[in-house]
Image (spheres, rainbow, N blue to C red):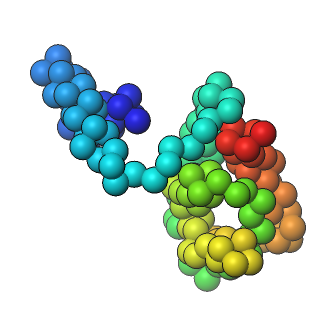
Amino acid sequence: MSIFLVLLWLFLTNSFTWAQLLLGLFLGWLLPLVAHPFMPDQPHVRHPLLMLRYLLVFLADILSSNWVVARLLLGKPERLRPAFIHYPVELDNDYAITLLASTISLTPGTVSAHYDANTKQLLIHALHFEGEEAEMISQIKQRYENVLLEIFQC
């Protein structure tokens, strides 16, 4: 968490000076210390190296999705076919579910609209959707959820 906060601080300030690094390190140490009593139980990451693979796939998807969304938005708006997809979630870990929903929302062209804990379904809005719902579900499972299952639950 501390490393993430340091990197977040450096990106937010858009300055990679020694002073900003030291301030980021201080905040990265202080914020988790202060917030710890308010945090729920920390997730147990079983395969931390898979997080790097997950991050690389996610970053590649962000880059490719940016091109697709830009092309769609620069084209004719009447050609867009928005849709809602009900995605069945297999994950049981709250952190993993949140990470999956955030990943979908941060990828251009898709947004996680709602998670129903009773039915374990995530409602996803796609800016433009052609094809079968099962195909999109399969793609999300292969690229994201199966890796999250390995990271947090296996």
Q: Is residue 90 visible?
A: yes
Is the residue 123 above or below the residue 61 in the image? below
Is the residue 143 above or below the residue 137 in the image? above
Q: Residue at x 54, y 61 (%)?
A: 105
147 to the left or right of 74:
right
Q: Is residue 68 visible?
A: no
Q: Position of residue 80 (x, y in %)?
A: 64, 76
Q: Position of residue 37 (x, y in %)?
A: 33, 49
- How many marks the image carries: the answer is 0
Q: Position of residue 109 (x, y in %)?
A: 58, 63
Which quadrant, please, contains the N terminus?
Answer: top left
Q: Residue at x 62, y 35 (%)?
A: 45
66 to the left or right of 128:
left
Is the residue 72 above or below the residue 117 in the image? above
Give the quarter of the image for residue 130. Answer: bottom right
Give the quarter of the image for residue 93. Answer: bottom right
Which quadrant, please, contains the C terminus?
Answer: top right
88 to the left or right of 76:
right
**Nearest to the observer: residue 95 or residue 52:** 95
Is the residue 55 above or below the residue 70 in the image? above
Q: Residue at x 22, y 35 (%)?
A: 30
Q: Residue furthest front?
A: 37
Give the quarter of the image for residue 102. Answer: bottom right
Q: Residue furthest bottom?
A: 78
Q: Residue at x 74, y 78 (%)?
A: 119
Q: Residue furthest left?
A: 19
Q: Position of residue 106 (x, y in %)?
A: 51, 55
